[in-house]
Image (cartoon, rainbow, N blue to C red):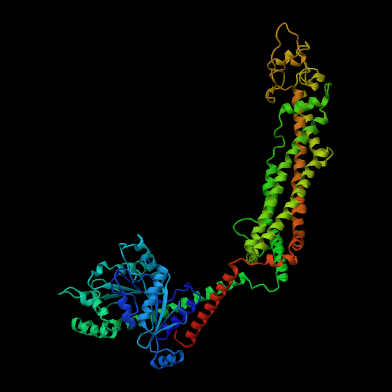
């Protein structure tokens, strides 16, 4: 199981090559306040001075430190093959293949790389430095050194430096595959440990938190850390380990880490003899190695699943980006054909990508025909905008100077045409809605059906322009046809239409029945001929006189004869009365302000209105049926039939190939990145497969 950590290191190397952290690998994250001894802990584990030193904030970028244990024989062999002088060396990711055997040079490179990204103003950055140390004196570990927690900005540090550092720490310890190494100085109160507080926010159960108490030798005289190390103050599930750091004087005097570890062991034997074997740097290294191995073993199944899922996603992404274009002519024809086919399939409802959130394509066109357009027509009142005075005026105008014995047909035609004309606007609006939907289908096909077009923005724009132009050309043709459909209905009022004839017959029967009922209800003294004629009030408007006097004033009499509950009073304008002593202009003769309809007028109005309503419903039914058919033939089906030939004719030209198939600037880069990531994921999958074959997992 010892070989599990090198496997994780190998996985880390794989993903470092593509500069990605999409896989959360098991690692040990070191957390603590400034000057708590974090750097000393890491250097003790490495056995070398490799980290920058100083006052205030020194670690300003995450340092991902991989310790790789190599046997002495392998070390000698590797050194000879690579021309390395020494048995320990380091490598940075950002310096590629450069090997460092001088650990002072490694420390200087860390400082230089930190200032290169974070600047020299004590600011922090979340861009990590990757360092790998090869040595026969280390155990296999992957550690992350982070900036120390701070409260108050110092010097020219940003005012939100505390939040920046916390966000950076949270980013790493939120990884469920990480082990949190919470570092606290022994000469501070354990109950106020910021490191443990932060760790508990993301690991409330303490399953992946190990506490390290540093500076055991700096506690006040007469005190010790026995209760802390035994877990009596604050219990930590994975344990609490105490160590002794090198002092600043030791560092200045270049005291070796190996000597410091020997002194540490002597201190523990003297001060904490019963706990000496469970504390110290060596015990910490072994404990971290053991915890990391067990943690890796627990995380591998989830890692394997995550890698396989990502490999599948990047394979699909790479397929979407497509292969580099070799045969441009064939590629252009293929893309045009595919777009035209998908456009037609969207209209027919057989597209591969079917929208589930809203109606689109043919389904929306159907909805426009039968719901939007149909309901709009049904909401049009057959007699809307038509008043009684309009009807009576039309009747009188159609008779000329002679009083009419019957209702003239001309008045019916005049009025019914006026009502039928109202169907034209909804019909043209129906054409407009279908045209808009066919425009939307273009975008739908671009987004869902033919993602390859996104590779070639100029081709995409050209296709949109051609289809839009085709739709634009068909719009006036379709509008003209719909206008003609209404004009055809207006051109000839077919009073012999079977449905209209049936309605007229039924209406005549009703009128005859009403006449018989009135005849039956009249007193016997009333002559039948007068009753049939509707009484003395049955004349046309303004034609009858009161008491045979032959003037208009009788029409002003209130309570004009006629059945109670007749139609509303007719309203006429009232011109100014002529001045006494002046000549009378016949055109200025006063007309009645209002009066009730006579029985004949009421009957004539009812006849005309019923005829208008009956014929209007027939025409509306025709329009409701014929307009969708016209739109389908002149617009929808025509575009479907001509789309591919139009696209080929406009775009499939030798002079346009290079321009149309020019990829977007970042497409090639994205394809390369996706290919590299897919290759890395496949390598990672192979590494995990090797673990199963060697029974390490």
Q: Is residue 201 above or below residue 364?
A: below
| Quarter that holds the N terminus | bottom left
Q: Which of 179 and 12 is in front in this view?
A: 12
Specify the quadrant of the image occupied by residue 327: bottom right
Specify the quadrant of the image occupied by residue 78: bottom left
Quick one: which residue is furthest to the top in this view?
581
Q: Nearer the viewer, residue 60 or 302?
A: 60
Measured as percent of width and height from the top left, residue 230 is found at 24, 77
Measured as percent of width and height from the top left, residue 518 is found at 76, 24
Residue at (63, 63) in percent of width and height: 448
Q: Is residue 203 above or below residue 562?
A: below
| Quarter that holds the C terminus | bottom left
Measured as percent of width and height from the top left, residue 19 is found at 49, 74
Specify the quadrant of the image occupied by residue 394: top right
Q: In this view, does 582 lie above or below 152?
A: above
Q: Is residue 457 at least partly visible in the picture?
A: yes
Count of picture labels = 0
Q: In this view, does 384 lie above or below 677?
A: above
Residue at (71, 17) in percent of width and height: 592
Residue at (25, 68) in percent of width and height: 191
Q: Nearer the viewer, residue 59 or 397?
A: 59
Q: Is residue 125 at least partly visible in the picture?
A: no
Residue at (74, 26) in percent of width and height: 602
Residue 251 relative to residue 90: left or right: left
Measured as percent of width and height from the top left, residue 173 is found at 38, 70
């Amino acid at each position: 199981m010892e070989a599990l950590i090198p496997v994780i290191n190998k996985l880390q190397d794989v993903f470092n090559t593509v500069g990605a952290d999409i896989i959360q690998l098991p690692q040990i994250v070191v957390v603590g306040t400034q000057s708590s001894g974090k750097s000393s802990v890491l250097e003790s584990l490495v056995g070398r001075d490799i980290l920058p030193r100083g006052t205030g904030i020194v670690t300003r970028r995450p340092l991902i430190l991989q310790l790789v244990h190599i046997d002495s024989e392998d070390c000698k062999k590797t050194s000879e093959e690579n021309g390395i002088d020494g048995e320990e060396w380091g490598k940075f990711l950002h310096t590629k293949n450069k090997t460092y055997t001088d650990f002072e040079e490694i420390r200087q490179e860390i400082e230089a790389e930190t200032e290169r990204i974070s600047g020299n103003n004590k600011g922090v950055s979340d861009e990590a430095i990757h360092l790998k140390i090869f040595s026969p004196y280390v155990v296999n570990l992957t550690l992350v050194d982070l900036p120390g927690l701070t409260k108050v900005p110092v010097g020219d540090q940003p005012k939100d430096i505390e939040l920046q550092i916390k966000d950076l720490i949270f980013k790493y310890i939120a990884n469920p595959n990480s082990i949190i190494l919470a570092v606290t100085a022994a000469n501070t109160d354990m109950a106020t440990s910021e490191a443990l507080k932060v760790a508990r926010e993301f690991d409330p159960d303490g399953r992946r938190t190990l506490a390290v108490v540093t500076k055991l030798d700096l506690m006040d005289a007469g005190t010790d850390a026995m209760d802390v190390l035994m877990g009596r103050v604050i219990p930590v599930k994975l344990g609490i380990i105490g160590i002794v750091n090198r002092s600043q004087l030791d560092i200045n005097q270049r005291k070796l880490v190996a000597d410091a570890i020997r002194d540490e062991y002597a201190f523990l034997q003297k001060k904490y003899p019963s706990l000496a074997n469970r504390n110290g740097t060596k015990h910490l290294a072994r404990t971290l190695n053991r915890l990391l191995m067990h943690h890796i073993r627990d995380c591998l199944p989830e890692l394997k699943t995550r890698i396989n899922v990502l490999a599948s996603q990047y394979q699909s992404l790479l397929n979407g980006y497509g292969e580099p274009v070799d045969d441009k002519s064939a590629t252009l024809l293929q893309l045009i054909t595919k777009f035209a086919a998908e456009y037609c399939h969207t209209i027919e409802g057989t597209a591969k990508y079917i929208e589930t959130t809203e109606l689109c394509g043919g389904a929306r066109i159907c909805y426009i025909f039968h719901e939007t357009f149909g309901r709009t027509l049904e909401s049009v009142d057959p007699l809307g905008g038509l008043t009684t005075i309009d009807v009576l005026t039309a009747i009188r105008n159609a008779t000329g100077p002679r009083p009419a014995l019957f209702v003239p047909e001309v008045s019916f035609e005049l009025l019914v045409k006026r009502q039928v004309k109202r169907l034209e606007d909804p019909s043209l609006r129906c054409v407009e809605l279908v045209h808009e939907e066919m425009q939307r289908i273009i975008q739908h096909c671009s987004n869902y059906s033919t993602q390859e077009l996104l590779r070639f923005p100029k081709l995409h724009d050209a296709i949109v322009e051609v289809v839009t132009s085709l739709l634009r050309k068909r719009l006036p043709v379709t509008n003209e046809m719909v206008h003609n459909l209404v004009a055809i209905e207006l051109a000839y009022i077919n009073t012999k239409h079977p449905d209209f004839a049936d309605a007229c017959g039924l209406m005549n029967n009703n009128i005859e029945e009403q006449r018989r009922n009135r005849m039956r209800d009249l007193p016997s003294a009333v002559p039948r001929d007068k009753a049939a004629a509707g009484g003395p009030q049955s004349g046309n408007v303004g034609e009858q006189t009161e008491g045979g006097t032959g003037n208009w004033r009788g029409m002003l009499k209130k309570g004009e004869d006629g059945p109670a509950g007749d139609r509303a009073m007719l309203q006429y304008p009232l011109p100014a009365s002529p001045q006494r002593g002046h000549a009378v202009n016949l055109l200025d003769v006063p007309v009645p302000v209002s009066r009730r309809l006579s029985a004949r007028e009421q009957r004539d109005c009812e006849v005309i209105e019923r005829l208008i309503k009956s014929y209007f419903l027939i025409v509306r039914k025709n329009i409701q049926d014929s307009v969708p058919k016209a739109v389908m033939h002149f617009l929808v089906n025509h575009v479907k039939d001509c789309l591919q030939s139009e696209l080929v004719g406009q775009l499939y030209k030798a002079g346009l190939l290079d321009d149309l198939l020019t990829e977007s600037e970042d497409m090639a880069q994205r394809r390369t990145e996706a290919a590299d990531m897919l290759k890395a994921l496949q390598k990672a999958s192979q590494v995990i497969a090797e673990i199963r074959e060697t029974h390490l997992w």
